[in-house]
Image (spheres, rainbow, N blue to C red):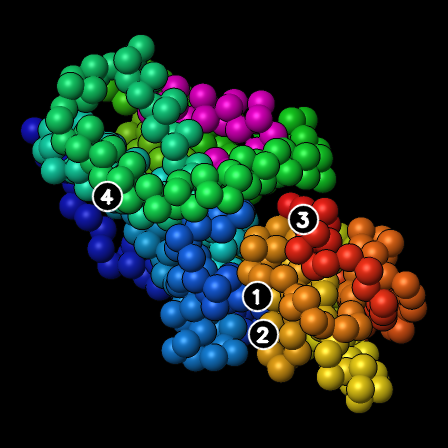
Amino acid sequence: MRVLPAFSRGPVLAVAASVGLVLTAVSGRYGYFGDELYFVAAGHHLDWGYADQPPLLPLIALLMDTLAPGSVAVLRIPATLAIVTAVVLAALLAREFGGGRRAQLLAAGAVAVSPGFLATGHLLATSTVDPLVWVAVTYLLVRWLRTRADGLLLAAGIVTAVGLQAKFLIVAFWAVAVVAVFICGPRELLRRQALWAGGAVAALTTIPTLVWQARNGWPQLEMGRVVAGESGYAGGMLGFLPLGFFAAGLLVGSVLGVVGVVRLLRAPEHRFLGVTALGVALLFMLVGGRPYYVAGLLPLLWAAGAASVEQRRPAVWWRWVPTWPVYALTAAALLMGNVLPVQPVSAHADRPLQVGNFQLDEIGWPAVVADVRAAYRALPPDVARDAVVVTGDYWTYSAVQGFAPELRSFSFHRGAAWFGTPPEDSGAVVFVGDPSPVAAAFETVTAVGRLDNDERVNNLVQGTPIHLLEGRRVPWAQLWESAHHL
């Protein structure tokens, strides 16, 4: 068995701690992101599955919100821990490739200055938990290649089982990896009982979610088509690789990633991992996946690239890239840019809407919910008694649930549509959003206001109209069936 260099514990943990401190410092600077509000709302409707995801994130959100109700900083602690762990695992991966102190720091630093990891690591999201699962699985596989300890394969199956409770993307990794192993070797891996035992564990733990999906018409499949359609905002297939390179980190992450792929493809023992990385990227590109879907493979590539840089002197023309000044400049650019919420909220005022700038959608939720509450309270007492709030998007519904729980609120959008319908004996509707999907079912539709986050920030809900709908002529069950969408 090949002897590994010592783990550079102190420096690597210092990098991980620095990332944790930065993420903690900014975690409560703005407010909840729309999806975070949805996870909390979904957690209060805990189930084995949801239309748009498995149950892990709602469960985590429920636990954190129970520990500290209304605290966005506490809600994000698991996300911070996920990124800190990814930093350490990247260094351990570099060590498995024979990398010493420098290689381990290069790999850990690549995670630390990656826009993709920091931007999603700032939020509690499936895109934070899922990459960590991929990093852990690839670490266990690389370690197995060196030690042939089958317990690592079983552990990889258990980690996969956890990952499947957050997102199903890890299935794509294993599907491509099995084919790559069959083609490139080592085929011995496919004959290991521990590998298939781990796969059985992952499959069995997913049964409750699959049963929920089957009973509810497999909405997750439709959600996949919705995501593919929405990928146009990122440039579709043409934008996949450019945005992927940006998420990796221009210069540092991109260069190490390319070097890492070459290193993996050249090494017979690790070749299947290089083929898997390329195959997964191609698969997600073809099916309309989002660029961050491949984030979990980046630390593997960075680790392999870092070990290569340490073991073989790079060419003169790019030798300057994996150096501490470039890392420092990249980190400074992240702090000054829009990757983390470092700027004051006022810096975003009156700017055009920027789809993909997550920070904008962390701003102003209490204020917009106050507008909904004001529209409700403006109703005559006899009308307000039986009135309900219905929203056209799941973010606003989740915000109303969180900041105005006294209002009976519902939504027919995405997973929120499964959380219940308004009671049949309800009366008027304070509708937030475009009422056209349901307007024909009511006698009168009257505009009564608009959402305003009070910060003049053009996010996805700023200016959303509020209408009063009265005189419902169709049962809610029938109306919900025709209106709900993903």
What amino acid is found at the position of numbered circle 3 in the picture?
Answer: Glu
Q: Secondary structure at mark 2?
A: helix
Residue farthest along the left direction in this orientation:
1
Give the answer, above or below, for where 435 lies relative to 362: above
Contact, mark 4 vs mark 2 (Cβ under 8 Å):
no
What whole-number distance in Å separates the C-alpha atoms at marks 1 and 3?
24 Å
- Which residue was labeled with disc 3? 481
Closer to the chain start, of discs 1 and 2, is 1
- Which residue was labeled with disc 1? 37
464 inside magenta stretch: no
Estimate how packed mark 2 is, as few (under 14), some (14 to 19) or many (20 or more) residues with alpha carbons within 10 Å: some
Closer to the chain start, of discs 1 and 4, is 1
- Which residue was labeled with disc 4? 158
Picture coordinates of residue 358, whole percent (x, y): 64, 56
Stretch of the chain drawn in magenta? 271-294
Q: Is residue 237 visible?
A: yes
Contact, mark 1 vs mark 2 (Cβ under 8 Å):
yes
What whole-number distance in Å separates the C-alpha atoms at marks 1 and 4?
29 Å
Estimate how packed mark 4 is, as few (under 14), some (14 to 19) or many (20 or more) residues with alpha carbons within 10 Å: many
Q: How many marks?
A: 4
